[in-house]
Image (spheres, coloured by chain):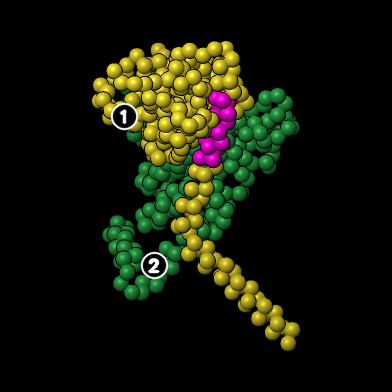
Chain colours: A yellow, B green
Amino acid sequence: MEEHTSLIVDGKRIDGRDMNELRDVKMNMGMLHRADGSCYIEWGGNKIMAAVYGPREVHPRHLQESSRAIMRCRYNMASFSVEERRRPGPDRRSVEVSKVSREALEPVVFLANYPRSVVDVFIEVLQADAGSRTAGINAASLALADAGIPMRSLVSACAVGKVDGVLVLDLVKEEDNNGEADMPVAMTPRGEVTLLQMDGDLTEAEFETAFEMAVQGCTQLYELQCDALKRRYAQVDADANVQEPPEQEEAPEDSFEADVEQFREESEDVE
Amino acid sequence: MRVVIPGEKLSEDVRQAGEGTYVADGKVYSQLYGMVHDAKGIRVIPFKGKYIPFEGDVLIGVITEIMSFGWIVDIASPYDSLLHIAEYPKRIDASDMSHYLSVGDCIAVVVKEVSPSMNVSLELKDGSARTLKGGRLVKISHTKVPRLIGRKGSMITMLQEESGCDLHVGQNGRVWITGPSRWVSIVADIVLMIEKQAHTTGLTDRVFEKIMEHKGGNAERKGGNAASEESSETQFLDELLK
């Protein structure tokens, strides 16, 4: 039997991170033109696409609510997202993640504004590397904003775990598989918690500390989400500028010539 | 005018709260990802969004279904709408309905009533059941319609005068353009350009420049470049179709 290798060596984790360090995160929006809103996230080895359609008509009709919109969420892992080919279709875990993701996002959306309609959220995992549910929630949050759906605020999520007895932020696959606890958390920037799950064992004191770490992590994610939103606007603006510079250069000249003509005429009068 | 995100604090003055904002703990926050306008109260206009029908809105609809009691009209919204058979200016039989307005026809309508559960009923604009024929129908986001019209109609008046085309803009983002076929295509492209650059400054000037480009290019016709060859080709077709 193989000896259990230490997951924490010389105060660093197996990928060289500190206990409180997040993996690299990149988020981009609006790449799916058919969807009303979309966001692609790369978080560590996770590659996840979130798409939002809505508000739109509900089919089948019997699901509609006369006073508000309903939200449907589908978390799905592609067959190629994991090393051992995963059979396509929902499994118990996907159904669970879909449910908790919906419950994490629903409270912030103003569903009452759109009676008899549905907001469909799709989270497709193209490559999985621990923490896909929290990555999916972060991406879905941005996709909802991108779609112009009214929300109280964004939702940010991250996971804290216990590895070799030490609490760490943002588990990687090896840490998740061999660790003692995994606790994903989602919250609004005001600190309202919309997702809190735990897999494993934590003492009450450990839980308190772990939750504090999660708050720190979610705050960092929130900064990244805001940055992605502000950046998207800058990108659209840049597209506009790239097309138009030639015309912009000409226009001032035309108005300048008119001024020069007027000046000439005026000075002739004077003389 | 700046970019705001959902949950961003906009003001401490609750009386200023307008469209696209919500009030919590005595402060005003943005509901949407878009641009904030401070003119009359604080409003947030989203970059993207679905058109939600409001009583009195003037729209361009497309007939999708015919029922015994009226026509179901697609108004580019999550909600379908109904043009009741009684709204038709003439007294017609249920069996004759498709003879007057058939599936696929475009009509100008006004939102008559929106119920709390979002059942939308329509009436004909100016009581006229004339279908929109010819020209081109372009769809833009309803949030960009104010920019297409411009302050006191400045943008749309300029477009119509300089191109010789007629533009009918529905508040649901559908735009119907009619006129000389060459200019209809140019105006359609310009409408899409306005949609894409609605949030930038100096847009009216850039649009004017673009139109002058097309006018100027036609008159000059110097050098064998592709642009001038294309315009002469469409001119030839215009002559044929007169």
Where is residue B37 drawn, in percent x and y? 64, 41
Q: Nearer the viewer, residue B15 or B173?
A: B15
Dot 1 and dot 2 residues touching (CB under 8 Å): no
Q: Amino acid at mark 1?
A: Ser
Count the marks. 2
Up/down of B229 relative to A114, above or below:
below
**Are the residues flagged by discs 1 and 2 from a single subunit?**
no
Secondary structure at badge 2 equals helix
Q: How busy is the neighbourhood of tag 2: few (under 14 within 10 Å), some, or many (20 plus)?
A: some
Q: Which residue is mark 2?
A: B218
**Going 73% across and 32% down the picture, which residue do you hit?**
B12
In the displayed structure, does residue B92 sit left or right of residue A266? Answer: left
Write down the quadrant of residue A153 in the picture: top right
Place of residue A48 in the rendered image (x, y in percent of width and height, measured from the top left): 39, 32
Comparing marks 1 and 2, which lies closer to the viewer? 1
Name the residue: 74% across, 84% down.
Answer: A270
Q: Nearer the viewer, residue B5 or B195?
A: B5
Q: Quadrant of the N terminus of chain B?
A: top right
**Which quarter of the rendering shows the C terminus of chain B?**
bottom left
Give the SS element for disc 1: helix
x and y percentages locating residue A118 in the rendered image: 44, 22
Residue under label 1, please give it.
A81
Q: Please tell me which residue is depicted at 40% across the width and 67% down the height of the picture.
A: B217
- Up-down relation of residue A244 to residue B90 (above or below): below
* Badge 2 amino acid: Asn
The region drawn magenta spans: A213-228
Residue B33 is one of the magenta-drawn residues: no
Determine the chain carrying the residue at label 1: A
Q: Position of residue B115 (x, y in %)?
A: 53, 20
Relative horizontal placement of residue A137, taking residue B185 as reference (left or right): right
